[in-house]
Amino acid sequence: MKRNQATLFAAGDVNAFFGLMLDNMSGLVIMAGILTGVFGMPRDLVLSRMLPGSAVGVLLGDLLYSWLAWRLARRTGRSDVTAMPLGLDTPSTFGMAFGVIGPCFLATKDPHLTWQVGMATIVLMGVFKVAASFCGPALRRSIPRAGLLGSIAAVALLLIAYLPFLKLFASPVVGFLSLGIVFISLLARYRLPMGLPGALAGIAAGTVAYYLLGAAGLLPGGAPAPLAAPQLELYLPLPSLEFLGGIPRALGYLPLAIPFALATVVGGVDVTESAAVAGDDYNTRDILLVEGVATLVAGMCGGVMQSCPYIGHPAYKDMGGRAGYTIATALFIGAAAVTGCLSFLVGLLPEAAVAPILIFIGIEITAQAFEATEKRHYRAVAVSFIPVIACLTTIEFGQMLGGLGKSAADLTGDLLATWQATTILGNGFIVTSLLWGAAFANVLDHRPGKAAVYLLLCSALSLCGIIHSPLASGAMFSPLAPPLPIAWHLAAGYAAMALSFGLLSLLGSPSAAGE
């Protein structure tokens, strides 16, 4: 009994809880802000139906991951098992908002039908992920570690660490104060006075500095906006068949939705390998199955956001987290959603004080990718960063164009060609990164025949838009009717490279293999 208790809860769970909880809360508030602020959807529907239903997925998924950690600890006799973190998928949050829910509302002007379509889309994504979970173990066994960890490291450094780092410059005193405390305590393992958890101390110090500077009129952006009192109201997201009314329209959005679901499945395989490297060897099928079930149940309860395992497991393990942080996150997010306190809680904490937690997680995951990969495969890890760089570029320049009141349609000449190429490279980035890393790892091992298999898979996936979709939305399409001829050229390019590797495998010197 003592061993099990130590497995579930530890002092490090406080640090880990703040990181996972704040990440999930931010996702819920971002979705609410987009749907109500950008598309003008009814606030009551978003807050009382969509957000609580989405939170159910986090509640269920994190509790199930806590149970898997407890089971692994019982089986191995270890007391240092860390639960896999689960949360709301950020890329598909924007994809659902701008690609499914918003356009559907603008087209129908019917908020209830739009909600049904969003629910149905999430339910269908959940069904897809449950079915795909049984293929996960085979993927993990067949793909080199450089591909699995390289793709996840690219996302960690460029999306999870870099983008939050920009928030620090909006309020440098707050941001760097919090960053310094987080780094010295969590990265350098420096013990803080009175044993304070690093994440809590960093956020608290940054938040106090933010409001003191604001009161003195010394914040770069002026005084902080006054906080509105939390409005407590009970929302109970119960499972129903309400989503059935949205199935017909939801089928039309699947070409956009399925790539997001597939990306989390691939990401789930990645994070399972990452956790194994950190010492917690979970069953890949179990991790993916929980993810799929959590997404499915969220959709049935009114949610419009999919759940997925987060890539921060090694970072949470380094914080000293066990299973307590996922249990606490599940209960906190569930309670905050059903009581309507989300907006108040997120508004209370300045972004510059919270961002260092995400920066730490991104750096920790990137470091693990190189530490756990054989040195000869470092170049393969580096190659896997390129598609994610393209994704980051489209995010940043897309926001810049929007701020200028422009869009990609206003570009001409070389700028337009560069934008189109960057968009194509970035669409489906996590799958592309994984396949490029795996292919190049085999090239470095002098196994061009195996590399050719991954390149042929790239060729097939580019023909239907799972990777390199030329559509701005990143949606899939029929290989018989691609939206632009570039899809055929991409497929042919990959096939030509695969053919050259295949010939080298047949004609090359066997003595060179494995050198």
Image: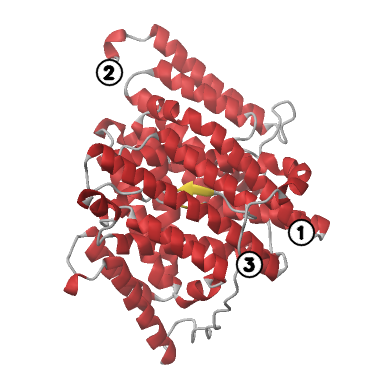
Res. 412 in view: no
Amino acid, disc 3:
Leu
| Quadrant in the rendering for residue 422 | top right
Q: Residue 397: horizontal and vertical position, in percent? A: 57, 57
- Residue 103 on image: x %, y %: 74, 55
Where does label 2 land, which residue?
A: 514
Q: Is residue 405 visible?
A: yes
Q: CA distance from mark 2 to mark 3?
A: 57 Å
Q: Residue at x 45, y 65 (%)?
A: 332
- The residue indicated by pointer 1 is 112
In this view, the residue in front, 498 or 315, is 315
SS for dot 1:
helix
Question: Amino acid under label 1?
Answer: His
Q: Which residue is mark 3?
A: 47
Q: Dot 1, crowdedness within 10 Å: few (<14), some or many (≥20)? A: some
Image coordinates of residue 157 in percent, x first then y, are: 39, 51
Q: What color scheme is it?
A: secondary structure
Q: What's the residue at 49%, 85% (across, down)? A: 222
Q: Which one is in front in this view, the residue at disc 2 or the one at disc 3? A: 3
Q: How dense is the environment of label 2, judged by Cα within 10 Å: few (below 14), some, or many (20 and up)?
A: few
Q: Residue at x 31, y 9 (%)?
A: 510
Q: If you read the primary sequence from the N terminus, does the residue marked by circle 1 or circle 2 appear first?
A: 1
Mark 2 in CB contact with mark 3 (< 8 angstroms): no
Classify mark 3: residues with Cα within 10 Å, few (<14), some (14-19) or many (20+): many
Q: Nearer the viewer, residue 312 or 498?
A: 312
Q: Is residue 200 above or below residue 210?
A: above
Asked if marks 3 and 1 touch (Cβ < 8 Å), the reply is: no
- From the viewer's side, name the closer residue of 299 and 306: 299
Amino acid type, callout 2: Gly
User: On the picture, is 450 further left or further right than 4?
Assistant: right
Identify the mark nearer the N-term, 3 or 1.
3
